[in-house]
Amino acid sequence: MFKTARFAFYIIFHPIDGFWELKHHKEKSFGAANAILALLCLMNVVSIQFSSYHYGLLDRESNNILLNATSFILPLLAWTVLNWALSTLLEGKATMKQIWVQSVYSLAPLLLSMPVLLVLSYMMTLGEQPFFVLIQVFAILWCAFLFLFGNMTIQDYTMSKTVVMALFTLLGIAAAIFIGIILFSTFQQLITFITTVVTEIRYMP
């Protein structure tokens, strides 16, 4: 599994060949992907908690460590489920498990950039912040590049179809978030209404 996880370094620079081999030949890729994701969540917490005060959070006592640790899991789950659901309608050839593995491996540049940025946060001044942000942006863009080429490879799509699929997936995630917010707000108002009614009944003469 460790050898399979280490394969992420190859995928960073050879996405098409790497994702094709990961789909067809790499055993234990699911366990390796979960190990990479766990390490990514851990590094996210470490980066937020231990970055220098110039680049980190000023109020670390009120920082939610659990939320930081799981900040990658829910978006990846949403992407995986919606991408798989749409791919079944658009002749995609990847399983949900394969999409999950490909998505996690696509975050490898972000994982590699985190320890580098953590060290640089103690070496750079505020005046050098643009270089710090440039590294972050480059890592995120490289992840997006891997997401596209990885999805294209495992789904056996053209690039144009992959882009359309990605846009529809993102729109689906946005719609799910919007519906979730509406349902949560409605449920919250219902609870408030019920609580008010119960209180009024209790204090009726």
Image (cartoon, rainbow, N blue to C red):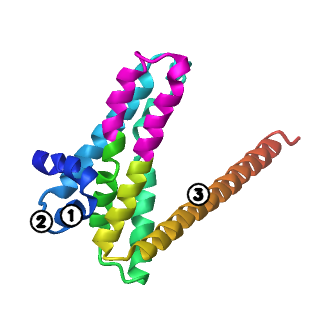
**Dot 1: what SS?**
helix
Q: Quadrant of residue 111?
A: top left
Q: Secondary structure at mark 3?
A: helix
Camera-nearest label, 2 or 1: 1
Q: Position of residue 129 (x, y in %)?
A: 52, 25
Give coordinates of residue 54: x percent, y percent: 52, 17
Q: CA distance from mark 3 to mark 2?
A: 36 Å
Disc 3 packing (10 Å; few <14; some 14–19; many ≥20): few
Q: Is residue 36 magenta?
A: no
Which callout, 3 or 1, points at the residue further toward the start of the chain? 1
Mark whose residue sits in front, 3 or 2? 2
Q: CA distance from mark 3 to mark 1?
A: 34 Å
From the viewer's perspective, is 61 left or right of 184? left
- Foreground of the two, 179 or 92: 92
Structural distance between the alpha carbons of marks 2 and 1? 11 Å
In the rendered structure, which segment of residues is drawn in magenta?
Answer: 111-140
Q: Which residue is mark 1?
A: 17
Q: Nearer the viewer, residue 65 or 20?
A: 20
Circle 1: is it few (<14), some (14-19), or many (20+) Cα within 10 Å? some
In this rendering, is residue 48 above or below 106?
Answer: above
Pointer 3 residue? 177
Q: Mark 2 highlights which residue?
A: 25
Residue at 39% x, 49% y: name it. 142
Residue extending farthest to the right is 205
Q: Earlier in the sequence, mark 2 or mark 1?
A: 1
Across and down, in percent, residue 179 comes to: 63, 62
Does residue 64 appear in the picture of this structure? no
The reply to whether dot 3 and dot 1 touch (C-beta < 8 Å) is: no
Residue shown at 38% from the left, 71% from the top: 84
For marks 3 and 2 on the same chain, the one whose residue lies earlier in the sequence = 2
- Magenta portion: prevailing SS class: helix
